[in-house]
Image: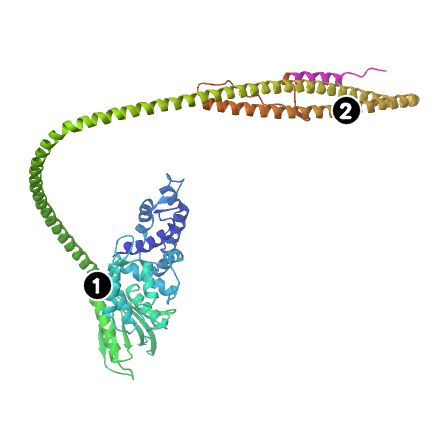
Amino acid sequence: MGLREELLKSIWHAFTALDVDKSGKVSKSQLKVLSHNLCTVMKIPHDPVALEEHFKDDDEGPVSNQGYMPYLNTFILDKVQDNFDRVDFNKMCWTLCARKNLNRNNLLISDDDAFKIWCIFNFLSEDKYPLVIVTEEIEYFLRKLTEAMGGSWVEERFEDYKLQLNSQDQCLSVWELIQLVGSGHFSKGMDRQTLAMAIGEVFHELILDVLKQGYMMKKGHKRKNWTERWFLLRPNAISYYVSEDLTEKKGDIMLDGNCCVESLPDKEGKKCLFIVKCSDKSFEISASDKKKKQEWIQAIQTCIALLKRDLPAPHREARQKRREQRLKLQAEQEQLQERMKELQIANENKQRELEAMRKKLEEAAAEAAEEERRRLQTQTELQDRYRTDLEKEKMVRQQMEEQVAQKSSELEQYLQRVRELEDMYHSLERALEDERQARQDEETVRKLQARLLEEEACKRAELEQLHLQQQKAISQTEAEKQELENERLAKEMALQAAMLQLEQLESDRQGALQQYQEVMKKLEHAANETRSWKDKVAHHEGLIRLIQPGSKGPQRITNWGPAAFTDAELSLREKEWQEKRTRPAQPN
């Protein structure tokens, strides 16, 4: 499995986690965030405009995963290089999918262990979507886990579990695998710490390609002193750290096909020595015992042999062989099924031939029976004919009676409808008469309102004239002050009287407006009643089409409510008022 296939499995988990309604579609904003995170963890320059350009014809809704795959291949996977931390990449995808799918109830493992099982699942799962892990790979993983815990593999227990799987789809999803391991079904008797250490060991081997790890002593190149280091053996390098927490890395021993490893005799008080010779330098290492020494030498020689032959790590090669074997068995099963189908088709053809022969015999027997039946029918036909004629005559008489009853019922219903229509016509006439009366009341109120507004305008003009005369009287000389003061008092009294008349007119106008509103309500009620009767008449008699009055134009609104005069009348009255206002006051 190449790098692209490995990355696609983790990305598939993240994408399906964003697909909340299981429709295979994710919103463009979520795809933007996912693409930006992928480019960040894989150290790829991110182009924020590329996604918009790719989906420029689909701005109004979500985009499908089929539409996202070309963008993913072109702008992300084609640019990826093996220079990023795959653990960080997997953790980013894990964070998106675990939040939605991981059920932490009754789990004996931590979230970090669940993440490691998730990575192992991606490594062992089939290259088909949706991702599943088959029975053979489940057994391989559980065997590895049991060996890492130091336990013995119980074949019978797994066979029982396999029978349960056979009743389903013979495979598990990643969340079912995490639930299986986290429930402790295959790790009974082991504590949580042992299970976590075993999961970490299998994770290091299968995902991080750590073929062997442990503490050993290493001889320095400069000071020639011996220091304990934690060693990790990968297919192409031996890395050594200060401790097993891997926080401080001290160096790498890069392996290639030209390297070699040899055993050394004990010296300088150190036992179980061996040396790793590379092209540029050599490394002397001391194991804790002879067994560890032999295991390390054999593991390093295996890595060098794989590098010479340009082969992947043993567990990756074993996985590939298991997949090839499964594909081979699947092809053989398909061939066998195809052969069985051919035999079944041949058998069905034979069965059809036999069935055709049986049908011919049955048809011959049926023809003979039919001839006998015809002879018997001829004898009874004359008897049945007379009986049938009598029954037909009875049925015809009964049908005629039913038709007469039905016609009488239809006539009664027709007369009832005629009476209903006559009542509706009378009601419609009354409603139309009410509507005409309401319109006449409206016209009367409108004329009254126009008259009141005209009187109000005249009074306002008189008030303006009195005000101008008062201002002119004030500007007279001091000698005429007493006379003008008397005149001003008289005019103020006249002004007060005019104001009282204006207030009375305002009150009359408000009353007229209220009366107009009541008339409008009556008119609206009459129009609604008329419309209701029209609908009823149209429902009972589809041929009637009443002519309704046209819609009124918009009313003009004044400071005192709806105006009762037209635009032309308003313009004329405004012009007269302006002329009265600008006209010079007449001297008394």
N-term-proximal mark, 2 vs 1: 1
**What's the residue at 24%, 25% (across, down)?**
392
Residue 516: image quadrant is top right
- Range covered by the magenta-colored residues: 569-588
For the stretch drawn in magenta, what is the main secondary structure?
Answer: helix
Name the amino acid type tagged 1. Answer: Ala
Quadrant where the image shows the N terminus: bottom left
Q: From the top left corner, tell me how far across and down residue 410 is, in percent.
A: 39, 23
* 205 inside magenta stretch: no
Write down the residue under mark 2: 504
- The residue wearing badge 1 is 318
Choose between 125 and 453: the one closer to the eye.
Answer: 453
Mark 1 Cα shell of 10 Å, populated few (<14), some (14-19), many (≥20): few
Closer to the camera in the image, 187 or 445: 445
Residue shown at 23% from the left, 67% from the top: 303
Quadrant where the C terminus lies? top right
Relative to residue 487, is residue 141 drawn left or right?
A: left
CA–CA distance in space, label 2 to label 1: 110 Å
Q: Position of residue 326 (x, y in %)?
A: 19, 58
Residue at screen point 21% across, 69% down: 302
Tell me: 539 left or right of 84.
Answer: right
Tell which of 294 and 286 is nearer to you. Answer: 294
Of the residues shown, which amino acid type is indicated by label 2? Answer: Gln
Q: How many marks?
A: 2
> Residue 355: horizontal and vertical position, in percent?
9, 43
Callout 2 touching callout 1 (CB < 8 Å)? no
Q: Which is nearer the eye, 42 or 367? A: 367
